[in-house]
Every structure is written in C-alpha cells, then in structure tokens.
Amino acid sequence: MTQHQHDTFTSMEAFVWLGFHHDVSLDFRVRMPNDKAGAKRVLGAVGCYNSFDPGKAFEVIDGWWDFVMRFELAREGSVALYATFPMYQHQALGEGTQGVWLTRDMVPVTTDACRVFAGQLGSELEDIGADEVTYDASARVLWAWWD
C-alpha cells in the first residue's frame, strides 16, 4: 500500500457527501460509526458547511467518546449533531470493552449527571460554532445545529 493510495468512501460516507455536496437529501439522520476513525471519516464527508468544521467537531466528539452512547449526524437544512447519553455506564462508546468510566456492572448514569454532561458538551459545541443547542432530558439527547 502506497502513501498516496486513494481510499474509497464507505456507503455512509458517500450518502453524507452526496447529501451535503449535491443536495441529494436536505433531511436525513445517520448513526455515526462506533469507531473513532469511521466517525471522523463520516464527519469529513460533510466538509466545511456554513459554520460547521468537521475537524473541530471531531475534536469535541473525541473528548466525549467515553461518556456518550451514540453520536448521530443529520442534515436538517444545515448540519446537526445528536449525542445520546447512556442509561448505564457500560453502554457508552469507549475504547474496546473498557473506557474511562466503564465497567461490566449495571451502574446507572443519573439524570442529573446527564444534564451536567449535556451542558458541558453543549457549551463546547457552541464554542466551535453551533448556532442552536438543546437538551431533551427525558430522551437523554443533546441536539446541536449549525446554520
């Protein structure tokens, strides 16, 4: 394999790229891969769109990997990111089977802890240009949108 060998798009990357670069769909939502390299590639398929910068978004996501159950990327006219917080610690993404705070025990993540996490994550997303951020405590889902 040479250093200049061209990587091919996964089907998800191609879908996201077509959605943002050719307006094939103005309204979609995809679950990002559970591995950091795949998530980074999917974000990269968006490119810089309005005030959204995929590199900055990945830096934030990378810092929250061990505390979030899933990330989703959406096109809702513009770029949106969803972060779902877990009910139990072992449900968070993390590296392999053991993350920073993960155990195999059924240790609950409190509603209050999720609210604090959402506030911190929301602030970080606003710092990189998110125009709107909301948190639905009952669903444990943070939504951020870039115009």
Image (cartoon, grey):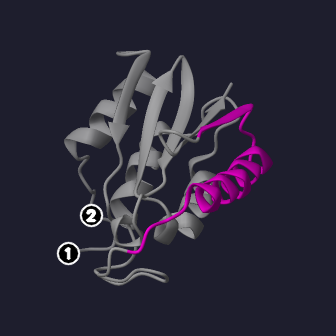
Q: Is residue 8 left or right of residue 124?
A: left
| Residues at circles 2 and 1 in contact by the CB criterion of under 8 Å | yes
Q: Which residues are magenta?
A: 107-136
Q: Which residue in the protein does label 1 denote?
A: 1
SS at circle 1: loop
SS at circle 2: loop
Compute the Cα span from label 2 to label 1.
Answer: 7 Å
Q: Is residue 93 above or below residue 9?
A: below
123 inside magenta stretch:
yes
The dot on residue 5 is 2
The image position of residue 55, as x and y in percent, is: 59, 55
Residue drawn at x 44%, y 15% is 26
Label 2 neighbour load within 10 Å: few <14, some 14-19, many 20+: few
The dot on residue 84 is none
- Count the marks: how many? 2
Residue drawn at x 54%, y 62% is 110
Residue drawn at x 69%, y 58% is 116
